[in-house]
Image (spheres, grey):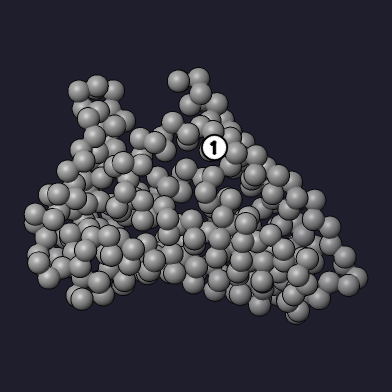
Amino acid sequence: MESAITIIIIGFVAGFILSIPVAGPINILITSNALLGKLPYCVKVAIGAAIIEFFYVLIIVFGIVTLYEVYKPFVPYILIVGSIILIIVGIRVMRTKFDLTHINLKEIVRDRIANKGGLLTGILINITNPSLFLGWLSSTFVIFSLASSLNLNTGGLDLIVKENLNTIKKINSENKLEQKVDNGIMERFNNHSKPDQLNPVVLSLIYAGSLSIGSFLWLSLYSRMIVKFRNKLRIGLISGVIRVLGFVLILIGIFLAYNSIKMFSVN
């Protein structure tokens, strides 16, 4: 029980804090739509993003050794798809037209058609963003390293995360002798775990779930703050900010496409 409570707190705090930066595609998409008052759309985007983060983090903590080698060859193709999606979304954001005579900055847009597609967009943007996967991998390692240094009871998940990261380094190593995947992580974990500890699968689910909830809570609160205080801004300024955010999305898409082309040329 102690390890479960610790994992819940660590996961929730990590998900909340690490979702605060506003330079990522999801945050930019939420910002641009929140300025338009489309709160339901933003909440749906946050839910879609959190769903993918749950599965990414679960894979990172528990199943990455087996799945990483399967996932790795498809990264260039995923980057291409992700870049296309971001460029299309960025163009749509930049082309957003404002009715300066009828827009009410004090009201929330609740029209179903206007708020349609948020869930799917959130899912697609995060699932086609390999940098998110690698970002959560490195962040999870730092988080559990810190927890271990503070002697917090993580139920042994810190050992699994450390082994996973070492295994990925071996897979990516140019030395062929180091590329043998270590499949004994769970066996060693079970040998060192206490009889009264929760199953590592349960702990992994708890961590991934609490982290995704923390991430969703931040994105939801962020959306509400933007919607609430947008009436402090002028229509012209809001229009300009949204177009800049759309342009940034296009740049991110181009950057992903460039990285994909580089990976194809290396292969």
Q: Which residue is drawn at 14% across and 49% down?
A: 187
- How many labels, in total? 1
Relative to 232, residue 86 above or below: above
Please name the residue shown 62% across and 36% down the image.
Answer: 254
In the displayed structure, would residue 257 be above or below residue 133?
above
Callout 1 amino acid: Leu
Comparing 4 with 15, the one in front is 4
Left or right side of 144 for 76: right
Q: Which of 156 and 14 is in front in this view?
A: 156
Q: Position of residue 50 (x, y in %)?
A: 49, 62
The image shows residue 119 at horizontal and vertical percentages of 61, 61
Left or right? Give the position of 91 relative to 189.
right
Q: Quadrant of the C terminus?
A: top left
Where disc 1 sits, the SS reads helix
**Hey, which quadrant is residue 3 in on the image?**
bottom left
Residue at 27% across, 64% down: 203
Q: What residue does disc 1 label?
A: 79
Residue 41, quarter of the rendered image: bottom right
Residue 167, position as x, y percentages in the image:
24, 38
